[in-house]
Image (cartoon, rainbow, N blue to C red):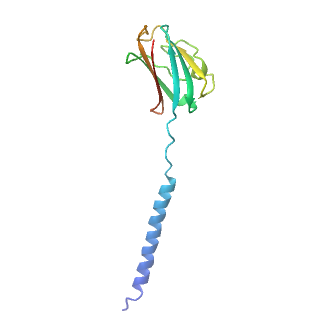
């Protein structure tokens, strides 16, 4: 029995296996798409003691309002009811926010646009002069902007 034909066959099998494994690594690296970066924006917040909020998009990325979540804190304490954006009527807020926070408006919030909302008397804590109000805007659990103002 001769062993002369065994080496070329084994070599071909090993080369085929190496080609398949290499193709798998190349394919996996090409299919891996990095996630989109979190949008960033500069927001200006104005608040008065009546609970009227005006948020102005000063610059940065255009934000998809439907992907946003807004958290408002008064002296470090979250409001009992947070604003679901966009909305028209929501617990803890007066009806009819303006700008991109209104459900009837455009779903994109671009630089130069402002949005307003007003706390209802049933939302706590109430805002008083000297309070520090923090507004945190997130998109898909990543912080987009944080603005803080003393009333």
Residue sitting at the far bottom: 1
Looking at the image, residue 129 lies above or below residue 147: above
Looking at the image, residue 91 lies above or below residue 61: above
Residue 60, quarter of the rendered image: top right
Does the rendering let one see residue 91? yes
Pinpoint residue 137: horizontal percent, then vertical percent: 48, 26
Q: Nearer the viewer, residue 33 or 7?
A: 33
Pinpoint residue 40: horizontal percent, then vertical percent: 51, 33
Does the rendering let one see residue 137? no
Pinpoint residue 34: horizontal percent, then vertical percent: 49, 47
Q: Across the whole image, how many numbered discs are drawn on residues?
A: 0
Q: Quadrant of the N terminus?
A: bottom left
Residue name at image x 47 percent, y 61 percent: 24
Looking at the image, residue 131 lies above or below residue 21: above
Q: Quadrant of the C terminus?
A: top left
Residue 12, quarter of the rendered image: bottom left
Residue name at image x 56 percent, y 13 percent: 95
Q: Nearer the viewer, residue 33 or 93?
A: 33
Q: Is residue 112 left or right of residue 4?
A: right
Residue name at image x 56 percent, y 17 percent: 116
Q: Is residue 1 left or right of residue 44?
A: left
Looking at the image, residue 50 lies above or below residue 58: above
């Amino acid at each position: 029995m001769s062993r002369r034909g065994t080496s070329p066959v084994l070599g071909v099998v090993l080369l085929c296996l190496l080609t398949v494994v290499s193709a798998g690594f190349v394919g996996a690296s090409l299919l891996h798409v990095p996630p989109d970066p979190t949008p960033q924006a500069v927001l200006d917040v104005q608040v008065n003691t009546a609970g009227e909020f005006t948020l102005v998009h000063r610059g940065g990325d255009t934000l998809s309002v439907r992907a946003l979540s807004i958290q408002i804190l008064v002296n470090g304490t979250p409001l009992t009811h947070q604003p679901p954006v966009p909305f028209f009527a929501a617990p803890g807020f007066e009806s009819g926010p303006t700008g991109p926070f209104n459900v009837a408006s455009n779903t994109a919030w671009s630089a130069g646009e402002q949005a307003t909302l007003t706390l209802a008397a049933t939302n706590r804590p109430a805002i008083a002069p000297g309070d520090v109000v923090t507004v945190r805007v997130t998109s898909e659990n990543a912080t987009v902007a944080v603005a803080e103002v003393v009333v």
